[in-house]
Image (tube, helix red, strand yellow):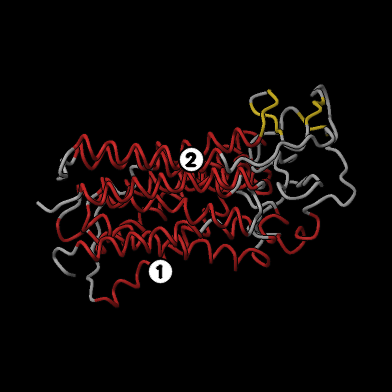
Amino acid sequence: MVANCDVCGWLAAIGGMLAFGTFGVPIKSEAARSVDIDPLVMQTYKTTMCFLTSWIVLLLGEEVTFTPWGIVSGLFWVPGGVATVYAVKNAGLAIGIGVGSSFIVLISFTWGIFVFNEHVHSRLDACFAVGCMMVGLLGMAYYSAPSVSHPTPQLLREDSDDSSEGSEGSPYHSLDTDEPIVEEAHSFHDEEECEDDEQSEDGELVEASGSVPDIAVPQTHTICCGMKVQKRTLGILSAMFTGIYGGSIMAPMKFAPPDAKGTHFLISFAIGAAIVNLCMWVIRYLFLCQRHGSLSGAYDALPSFHFRKMWLPGSACGTLWSIGNFFATISVQFLGEGVGYSVVQASMLVSGLWGIFYFKEIEGRETISKWFLSASITVLGILLLSYEHHEK
């Protein structure tokens, strides 16, 4: 690969923006909504495609190298990826990606400029540029908020928990339908039998049992820690977690040996992500064992992969993310963590356009105009940051 090529870095950043801004589209697809796909299941599709496609770099003449720092990157990505899926499902594509991207900009810029001492013309001006990007991204996320509706309350069991528990009475409801989704606990291996029973046709309520009280909540809310919480709020919090925790995904590459950086790092990252993803399934299974009191009960409570419906959107989501990660890695290699990965997070521009024109998440001429104004501030921040970058 070329030793130093700023143009390559900027072109890669644009490619990363396009791919990262689009990978969330399959999460909002009709197939994903119809089965109310579990976040960890969707992340597993992403991880699988990331693992399979990472070996393509061998066709570019790269050698197989592995560094444990790939596992560290996986520790940042996989949990953050699960949170991203949850955020997109519950807060929408534009706001889910936007909030996460704004915090990723802050974290990656901090790593690059203040930890790795990457060179810029002026740290103060670079901070101003990143500030513009964050203000713009947060503005786009704010004006991406959907209109608040007041659907008919329904009864949910108080012990209904987040989908990460994969048990009965899933709190998820489709964001794009008036019908609740009441999903029975079933094994990920019996998707053939359960596929047609994912959604209650008549919108029946989850029955309370024993001493567990019924809590009336609207479809826009769920029960979390015994409290009624708006799902959109949990989605935004998940997006913040993605940015604050997952924003360090590229930092471990800086600590890798010279022969394991850049595109060499992709294989290490894919292996590390696969290990972390598998560990998350083991942890989830052990948790369900403790909750259900039996190995078979825990196995039956694992969420379905819905292979018949989800293989295409799941594979598309994972492939798009892998393409974005490939370009982001090249961008970081040439432009640095502070500039390269920060610019890639302008993918919110792309996801926001999907949200406006395809998913109709943003309505009203005034709101859309404010969104585009925020987008302009983001672009200004990118231009200022590009000026601040310079070679050693």
Q: Residue at (61%, 43%) from the top-left corner?
A: 366
Residue found farthest to the right: 202
Quadrant hosting residue 381: top left
Q: Secondary structure at mark 2?
A: helix
Which image quarter holds the N terminus?
A: bottom left
Please state which of the two labelled residues, at mark 2 or mark 1, is closer to the viewer.
2
- Tell me which amino acid carries mark 1: Thr
Q: Relative to 147, is 309 above or below?
A: below
Q: Residue at (41%, 58%) from the top-left corner?
A: 17
Query: Residue 239, how many percent across, how many down?
Result: 50, 40
Residue on which the image places disc 1: 53
- Tell me which amino acid carries mark 2: Val
Which disc, if any, is residue 99? 2
Name the one closer to the observer, 328 or 270: 328
Name the one closer to the observer, 37 or 102: 102
Residue 357 located left or right of residue 247: right
Query: Residue 249, how many percent across, how many down?
Result: 34, 47
Residue found farthest to the left: 392
Q: Secondary structure at mark 1?
A: helix
